[in-house]
Amino acid sequence: MANNNYDVIIAGCGAAGLYAAINLPKNFRILIISKRELTLCNSALAQGGVAGVYNSPEDNIQFHQNDTLIAGGFKNNTDAVHTLVSEAAQDIAHIIELGVDFDKTADGNYHRTLEGGHSRHRIFHHKDATGFEIVTKLLKTVQALPNVEITENSLLCGVVKTSTGFSADILKDGKYFTANCHFMIMATGGIGRVYEFTTNSAIATGDGITFAYEMGANIKNLSLVQFHPTAFNNRHTRECFLISEAVRGEGAYLLNCNGERFMQNYDDRLELAPRDVVSHAIILESRKLCSTDFYLDISRKDSGFIKNRFPMIYSNLLEQGFDMTTDRIPIFPCQHYLMGGINVDGNAQTSIDKLYAAGECSHTGVHGNNRLASNSLLEALVFSRHAAQDIVRRTEQEDIPKTYQQADFAHTEGLEPIPHGFRTEIRHIMQQSYFVIPDKKAAVEGFERVKEIRDILTNEKFMVNSDYVEAKSLATVAYIILKEVI
């Protein structure tokens, strides 16, 4: 790169990172770091939709706020929740202006679906691939901005706070380069790959959380991990295909190994109870019946409706040998989402000056103990916009340096790669000790081993590549989670 100095560096190319870039001024020089290909992110995998009160006579922001608080066990940050629900309309309207194509009814109005924990039909969606629709439309907008540079397949290896902002150590095409900025936004997504089974994409290793933690940022409630109750039960692959909450919202039943509905034994809301409630119910029912065979069944619905409403899920299940219009779908809980993360204020500002965080890697407090379905994409939009707006405010009110200090990153040649097996061991520890219903004894034992692995990766010298960066991130994430719970 001819000039490696930027006003803002954004780590992450999902909904939060892209929307932040769109909301920054066109005279800002911006670098977006994409770890892998541009659409490989958790945002693009989001099936259900975006929750929000927008041109909805039968709904209001108080209903949305109450549903969010109930799902979160009233442990939410109420100010952040109010911001989320009251500003949903403006960001939904904005992304529609940017070309996002939400499904409509025959009369031309937007179709809103229902998901677990919602008291009203308020989920805007594009079939069952809403996240991909949003990411691709935001990406198209960003790629047309002359002030934004995107570096694809680029590994962020480290971040250092400098007197003028930040220096980022980046590995691309086997070569390292340093990029400097005055402001930085972490939008690096979740931590799913710290588990053996997750709905998350391959990039979700908690890198941004780890870099912020190493710089001294406040990390909060990292142990608030959400397990989705209806992932396709194929225990042969690490990445589990999600069967959207919206399938239950459209009337699917949960069945145990005997083909019986069972949610009535655990919650009056039945299949539409919040995710943590349903996941707990499945685990308890599993222990009761000594079986992990559970199913989702929507076959009683019209086949044409199912194919049109859930084309991606229908197609993916067919590839696995299941026709959801006639067959029961094998499901079981797996890791899905992170409610905790890099702690931020209402402007997405972290405890480190000029460092912001947005999306799943951040902790805004809106989700409380459990995220309400389809609030995640909304959170990414609302608070990444707040980050952009706060950066603009600061540049207008403060004396921002014209110069850039560059940190030195050591890349000693000839170092050995990390020992094989660290990541696999960490995943096994987390799966055994902290899955849906935690095992306190296993968590205590697992913490000691995770701490040992993290010490090795932190204090010894290894080749700095994706294996090293991701293993250190997974070790750090597991260390923080287990430290919180033991």
Image (spheres, rainbow, N blue to C red):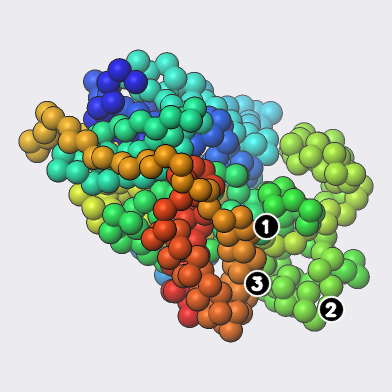
- Looking at the rendered structure, the number of numbered marks drawn on it comes to 3
Q: Residue furthest front?
A: 414
| Mark 2 burial class by Cα count in 10 Å: few <14, some 14-19, many 20+ | few
Depth check: 408 or 323 in front?
A: 408
> Residue 53 has which mark?
none
In which quadrant will I find the N terminus?
A: top left
Q: Earlier in the sequence, mark 2 or mark 1?
A: 1
Depth check: 120 or 25 in front?
A: 25
Instruction: Determine whether label 2 and label 3 are within 8 Å by CB.
Output: no
Instruction: Determine whether label 1 and label 3 are within 8 Å by CB.
Output: no
Depth check: 143 or 409 in front?
A: 409
Q: Earlier in the sequence, mark 1 or mark 3?
A: 1
Residue drawn at (7%, 36%) of the image = 399
Q: Position of residue 160 (x, y in %)?
A: 27, 46
266 lies left or right of 154: right
In the displayed structure, would residue 175 be above or below residue 225?
Answer: above
Q: Residue furthest bottom?
A: 441
Question: Closer to the observer: label 2 or label 1?
Answer: 1
59 lies left or right of 461: right
Q: Earlier in the sequence, mark 2 or mark 3?
A: 2
Residue position marked by numbered label 1 in the rendering: 197
Residue drawn at (44%, 20%) of the image = 143
| Mark 3 burial class by Cα count in 10 Å: few <14, some 14-19, many 20+ | some
**Mark 1 and mark 3: Cα distance apart in space:** 11 Å
Q: Secondary structure at mark 1?
A: loop
Residue position marked by numbered label 3 in the rendering: 432
Q: Amino acid at mark 1?
A: Phe
Q: Is residue 376 visible?
A: no
Q: Amino acid at mark 3?
A: Gln
